[in-house]
Image: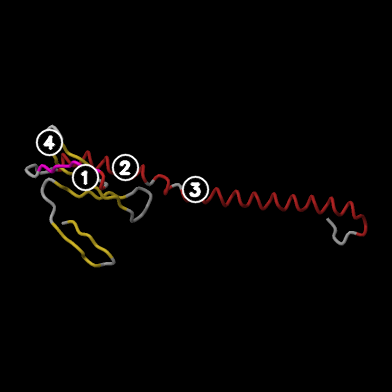
Amino acid sequence: MAMLRQNGWKLNAFALPDCVKRLVVPVPGLDGVEMVGYVVACRSESGSPEIRLVCAWEELEGLEPAETVELTDTLVEPLRRRLEERAQLEFASVRTVPSIERDNVRAAYGQELLNFLVMDDLMGVRARSAGENASFLV
């Protein structure tokens, strides 16, 4: 049974026909994140039966469910793998965030070190030009 929930309230519930199966796959590397898709047995434009993976509203365009077809695990499994691959691709950039953050912190430390070296050099130049009357020593 598929359910639409908003703010914890059940808005609508309905049973899916045998020609539709809901797939949920975990997104690798992101705890608690899942990607949802629907496997639908439908008829192609020529009328022949086909199995589709639907993950977006746009993919419903022209879809004519074949309500006499019952989806089996054998038919669904290849589309489950395709959904897993799609989840990996779509969330690849999210999984790289920790390494990007780590690189940014390293770059910030390097920039701070460069700032200190430039300040030290500028103060040394200023101290040499001021001579013994410099109010600071390097």
Circle 4 packing at 10 Å, graded few (<14), some (14-19), many (20+), is some
- Badge 2 or badge 1: first in the primary sequence: 1
Residue that mark 3 sits on: 99
Outermost left residue:
68
Circle 1 packing at 10 Å, graded few (<14), some (14-19), many (20+), is some
* Badge 2 amino acid: Arg
Query: Left or right of 137: which side holds 42?
Result: left
- Could you tell me which residue is drawn at 89 percent across and 59 percent down? 134
Please check the rendered image and state whether residue 109 is part of the magenta-colored stretch, yes or no: no
Outermost right residue:
132
Label ID, residue 49: 4
Q: Nearer the viewer, mark 2 or mark 3?
A: 2
Badge 2 element:
helix
Q: Nearer the viewer, mark 2 or mark 1?
A: 1
* Badge 1 amino acid: Leu
- Could you tell me which residue is drawn at 49 percent across and 48 percent down? 99
Across and down, in percent, residue 55 comes to: 26, 46
Badge 1 element:
helix
Badge 3 element:
helix
Residue that mark 2 sits on: 86
* Badge 4 amino acid: Pro
Query: Left or right of 33: which side holds 3?
Result: left
Residue that mark 1 sits on: 60
Circle 2 packing at 10 Å, graded few (<14), some (14-19), many (20+), is some
Q: Quadrant of residue 13?
A: bottom left
Badge 4 element:
strand
| Circles 4 and 3 in contact, beta carbons < 8 Å | no
Q: Which residues are magenta?
A: 59-66
Q: Report the coloring of the rendering.
A: secondary structure
- Badge 2 or badge 4: first in the primary sequence: 4
